[in-house]
Image (tube, rainbow, N blue to C red):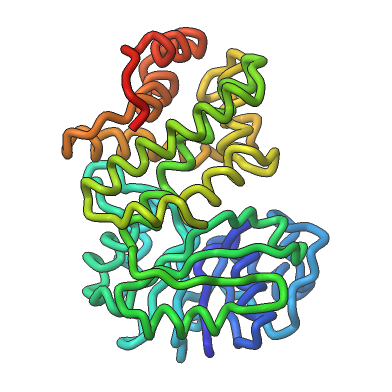
Amino acid sequence: MRAAVFGSGNWGTAFAKVLADAGNEVTLWARRPELAAAIEREHVNPDYLPGIALPETLTATHDATAALDGAELVAFAIPSQTLRENLVQWAPLLPTDAMLASLMKGVELGTMKRMSEVIAEVTGAGPERIAVVSGPNLALEIAQEQPTATVIACADPDRAEALQRACSSAYFRPYTNTDVIGCELGGAIKNVIALAVGIAHGMGFGDNTAASLITRGLAETARLGIELGADPMTFAGLAGLGDLVATCSSPLSRNRSFGERLGRGGTLEQAQEATHGQVAEGAKSCRSVLELARHHGVDVPITQAVEAVCFRGLRPPAMLDALMSRSVKSEV
């Protein structure tokens, strides 16, 4: 398969490597011409995955037209809140029957749309052409070829299976699913829950607190997902529990690390400076996830608390006090 991956950060580069290792011809698009040139010349991404050798069959470019030439698969791995503005530029260049895959995990601010919905709206592609890749996929570990599994979700099972075949390798095992809504919500909300776990860890709390936040975070994810039409079983799988555990537990998780800095008393700006100017996806998505939940009348207390810490001046101790003082009730 001829594939193009738009976004040369950790995850975009790692997924491009997966596709190339699976036998595909892959072009990686980079926003900065100098990074594209470095990847093309050295077969290493020096900014995001230094020391990881990239396959010779993987090329890089800053030219979107060249990247899309003949592409049968186009995967997007850019910050979720920039997807729309970029797609407006790329949409006229997209091959008319190419499969479009979202590697992003977020909900768009203002519109409350999932990434697949943004892709459909801007490109006019039908649901049978749009897929979502989601799971416990920490980019560095995948780039190091550590065994991992993921979910390919698409309304069209045949298209899902085609992408499954295209990215199957000795270290990357994809499963298929038709529940696009559940897979996308699981990926977006787990970033917010990981911030909460990071905040608690930064305050000095241990595994009981983390496990409680992970479990109750999964419960509020499922509540919102079911309201939107997702399959509850999706949240017990790789795109739900699997992704949530990896993101909340690993020091490689930007969301957890970002939350730790907040938990130690840092501001949003200070946490951003400590992560080399990058804002964690959970901090960007918590407002849109909260807006989506309120629109549908779903209670999401952890998301609400994280949003208050990030944007309303709530201090982390007050966040945990608010969560612990909620009225007691049945678990289910």
Toward the right, the furthest residue is 51
Q: How far across and how far down the image is residue 166, in percent?
A: 55, 83
- Front-most of 11 and 295? 295
Tell me the residue at 20%/33% (across/down).
294
Tell me, yes or no, if residue 217 can be seen here. yes
Tell me the residue at 29%/42% (across/down).
109
Tell me the residue at 48%/34% (across/down).
215
Residue 47: image quadrant is: bottom right
Residue 220: image quadrant is: top left
Q: How far across and how far down the image is residue 329, in percent?
A: 32, 19
- Decide: is 141 above or below 190: below
Q: How far across and how far down the image is residue 79, in percent?
A: 46, 52
Q: How far across and how far down the image is residue 191, in percent?
A: 48, 41
- Front-most of 271 and 319? 319
- Decide: is 59 above or below 208: below
Residue 107 is left or right of residue 291, and the answer is right
Which quarter of the rendering shows the C terminus? top left
Residue 243 is left or right of residue 90, and the answer is right
- Decide: is 14 above or below 162: above
Residue 167: image quadrant is: bottom right
Residue 78 is left or right of residue 156, and the answer is right
Tell me, yes or no, if residue 85 can be seen here. no
Tell me the residue at 34%/63% (across/down).
180
